[in-house]
């Protein structure tokens, strides 16, 4: 038993905790919950010939890789982030050589010679916003349970760059339902610490079949009423660099939640414009799914719904069944998440074939299809045989007009 087992280190200065890690007294202990209010960093050390490509890869995937500092080749300290630091001894590391992860060493001192031709990337970590969570009244379940967060591979792909190509890895935190919007806003304003979550709700939607089946970290127990919330995770660096297969190997801070503790405070970039204030919306219960829009956008859609519904109900139109509060908002956000959409065009409904009303509806359906395709959706139009030829005719005419406009 260590004399530090009952110490949380929440109120300690990072420099003092780094000294204990360097001395081997805290090596292997997750840094989640330590040094509240200070930034923590993921660490990736790559051969210098890969450094430019890795930096470009990070810039394409800032959620997973918010770069705080890129060292010079062979530089062992991080002057903008910490005083008296030595990356060889101030953490716990994974070593990869020939495509294999080797047992984690106590330090990287034995690799001092190899590191002369390597570059260290310090990237933001979600541990950095945990202090802000507690200040805002959001519990941090893994800290309560003295555990690392649960970390999972997903079906979401990073934007590739040259040889770097992998799936996004996420960390998961259980958040009480009534604290979800607070948690989202806190992290939305900390882009250097992974920023806002990329998914809230059913893990299967992002390719996670079982929250008990972690890929890294620890299994954290929820409290009744908690909702799983997922942030991009710095562990994404491991499959990313593995995909590049550097022949001389690379190092990362490891997968036991032992991060580099910075002397700099967690950075908040808080806007006051309504267009920058996020509003969380539950769009589905089964499967559980939340989405987000700015307060300004939510207000516009709600006002539009207020104006549309009485007219549609009076006309017994296609929106007449939208009586649930914020149904239009939820429908719009559901469309934003969908990768494929079916546009259903009803039959004539007693109208004469070729009538102005029927033609207008078909034009609207084609315009909606084109808009959704422009947003990258895979769209299928579903209709009866009587509408098929007219729809094709309208689509051809719109394409012809568009071609003329570009001549």
Image: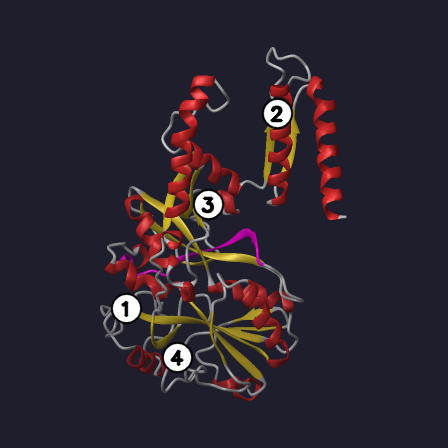
Counting residues from the start of the chain, the first of labels 1 and 2 encountered is 1
Q: CA distance from mark 3 to mark 4?
A: 34 Å
Observer-side mark, 2 or 3, equals: 2
Asked if residue 251 is positioned above or below residue 334 in the image, the reply reads below
* Residue 376 placement: quadrant: top right
Observer-side mark, 1 or 2, equals: 2
32 relative position to 53: left or right: left
Query: Which one is in front, 241 or 407?
Result: 407
Q: CA distance from mark 1 to mark 2?
A: 60 Å
x, y percentage for residue 193?
41, 65
Asked if residue 210 is positioned above or below residue 238 in the image, the reply reads above
What's the residue at 54%, 66% (across, down)?
Answer: 238
Mark sitting on residue 203: 3
Q: Which residue is mark 4?
A: 81
Observer-side mark, 3 or 4, equals: 4
Mark sitting on residue 36: 1
Over which residues does the magenta segment extend? 144-158
* Residue 115 placement: quadrant: bottom right
Query: Which one is in front, 169 or 103?
Result: 169
What's the residue at 32%, 62% (across, down)?
Answer: 130
């Amino acid at each position: 038993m260590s004399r530090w087992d009952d110490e949380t280190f929440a109120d300690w200065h990072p420099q003092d905790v780094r000294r204990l890690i360097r001395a081997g007294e805290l090596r292997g202990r997750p840094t989640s919950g330590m040094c509240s209010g200070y930034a923590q960093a993921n660490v990736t050390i790559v051969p210098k010939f890969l450094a430019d490509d890795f930096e470009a890869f990070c810039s394409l995937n800032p959620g997973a890789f918010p770069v705080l500092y890129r060292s010079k080749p062979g530089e062992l300290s991080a002057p903008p982030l910490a005083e008296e630091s030595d990356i060889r001894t101030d953490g716990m590391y994974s070593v990869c050589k020939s495509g294999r992860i080797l047992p984690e060493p106590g330090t990287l001192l034995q690799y001092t010679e190899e590191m002369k031709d390597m570059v260290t990337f310090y990237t933001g970590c979600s541990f950095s916003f945990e202090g802000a969570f507690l200040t805002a009244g959001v519990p941090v379940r893994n800290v309560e349970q003295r555990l690392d967060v649960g970390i999972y591979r997903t079906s979401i792909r990073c934007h590739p760059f040259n040889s770097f190509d992998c799936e996004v890895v996420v960390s998961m935190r259980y958040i009480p339902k009534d604290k979800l919007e607070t948690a989202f806003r806190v992290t939305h304003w900390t882009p250097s610490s992974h920023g806002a979550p990329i998914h809230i709700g059913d893990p299967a939607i992002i390719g996670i079949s079982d929250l008990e089946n972690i890929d890294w970290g620890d299994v954290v127990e929820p409290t009744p009423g908690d909702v799983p919330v997922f942030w991009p995770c710095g562990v994404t660096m491991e499959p990313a660099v593995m995909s590049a297969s550097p022949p001389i190997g690379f190092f990362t801070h490891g997968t036991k939640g032992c991060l580099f503790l910075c002397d700099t405070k967690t950075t908040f970039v808080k806007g006051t414009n309504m267009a920058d204030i996020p509003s969380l919306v539950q769009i589905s219960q089964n499967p559980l799914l939340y989405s987000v829009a700015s307060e300004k956008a939510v207000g516009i859609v709600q006002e539009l719904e207020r104006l549309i519904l009485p007219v549609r109900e009076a006309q017994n139109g296609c929106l007449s069944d939208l009586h649930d509060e914020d149904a239009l908002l939820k429908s719009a956000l559901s469309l934003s998440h969908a990768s494929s959409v079916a546009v259903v065009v009803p039959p004539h409904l007693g109208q004469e074939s070729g009538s102005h009303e029927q033609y207008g509806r078909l034009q609207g359906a084609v315009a909606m299809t084109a808009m959704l395709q422009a947003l990258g959706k895979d769209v299928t139009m579903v209709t009866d045989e009587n509408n098929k030829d007219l729809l094709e005719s309208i689509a051809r005419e719109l394409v012809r007009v568009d071609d003329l406009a570009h001549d």
